[in-house]
Every structure is written in C-alpha cells, then in structure tokens.
C-alpha cells in the first residue's frame, strides 16, 4: 500500500509540475511531465480496477445431520456444510431460525 501511495504522489506531483510549467513558461517543456503524471495516475486507477479480487461465492449451507454438545458450555451445536467451498460451520441450535 505504501508503494502505491508513493507512486500516486509522484504522479500527481509530475502532473502539477507539468501543468505549472506549461502555464507559466509556455515553452512546451512541461508537456512530458504532464503526460507522465497523467499516465501514472490512470495506470494506478486501472491497476486497482483490473486486479481486484472477485466477490466470494454465496454460501449454500446445508445441514449435515451432525450434532454435538460443547463440552465447556453444554450448548448443542449443529454442523453445516457448504458443498461449493467445502467449508464447515458449527452453529448453536439456539441461534437457528425455525
């Protein structure tokens, strides 16, 4: 995250320096800085959009029929299973909706 922030800062600084150079000196020497800053900012925005993580799949929890009591509290639990991911979850029976 620090590298991305530093790159954004340098790109913004190049963009501003190029714009100031073009507006004050009017010689065209600020154009490369202006282009470099713009490309840096756009590339960073594109990178964030292009390589974002996909949304996790919706869990489809199914009861396995397994039940047990928690030895510490004595509370009954039921085992739930998601066939898409293979994940197991232990849910107290008192929190289940009827």
Image (cartoon, grey):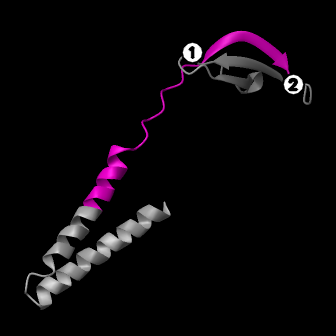
Instruction: Say above or below: 55 vs 71.
Output: below
| Residue 86 falls in image quadrant | top right
Mark 2: secondary structure: loop
Q: Position of residue 31 (x, y in %)?
A: 13, 76
Does 47 appear in magenta?
yes
Q: Which residues are magenta?
A: 41-70
Residue 83 is labelled as 1
| Residue 96 falls in image quadrant | top right
Q: Which residue: 72% across, 18% down?
A: 79
Residue 1 is labelled as none
Question: Hey, which residue is sitting farthest top in the picture?
Answer: 65
Q: Quadrant of the C terminus?
A: top right
**Within 10 angstroms of label 2, few (less than 14), some, or many (20 or more) residues?**
few
Q: Position of residue 39 (x, y in %)?
A: 23, 62
Q: Is residue 96 visible?
A: no
Q: Position of residue 87 (x, y in %)?
A: 63, 23
Is residue 40 shown left or right of residue 31?
right
Count of numbered labels shown in the rendering: 2
Q: Which residue: 11% across, 91% down?
A: 25
Does 45 appear in magenta?
yes
């Amino acid at each position: 995250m620090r590298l991305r922030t530093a790159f954004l800062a340098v790109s913004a600084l190049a963009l501003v320096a190029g714009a100031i150079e073009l507006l004050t000196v009017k010689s065209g020497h600020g154009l490369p800085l202006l282009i470099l800053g713009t490309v840096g900012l756009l590339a960073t925005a594109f990178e964030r959009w292009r390589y974002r993580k996909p949304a996790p799949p919706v869990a489809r929890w199914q009861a396995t029929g397994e039940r047990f009591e928690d030895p510490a509290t004595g509370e009954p639990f039921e085992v739930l299973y998601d066939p898409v991911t293979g994940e197991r979850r232990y849910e107290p029976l008192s929190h289940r909706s009827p």
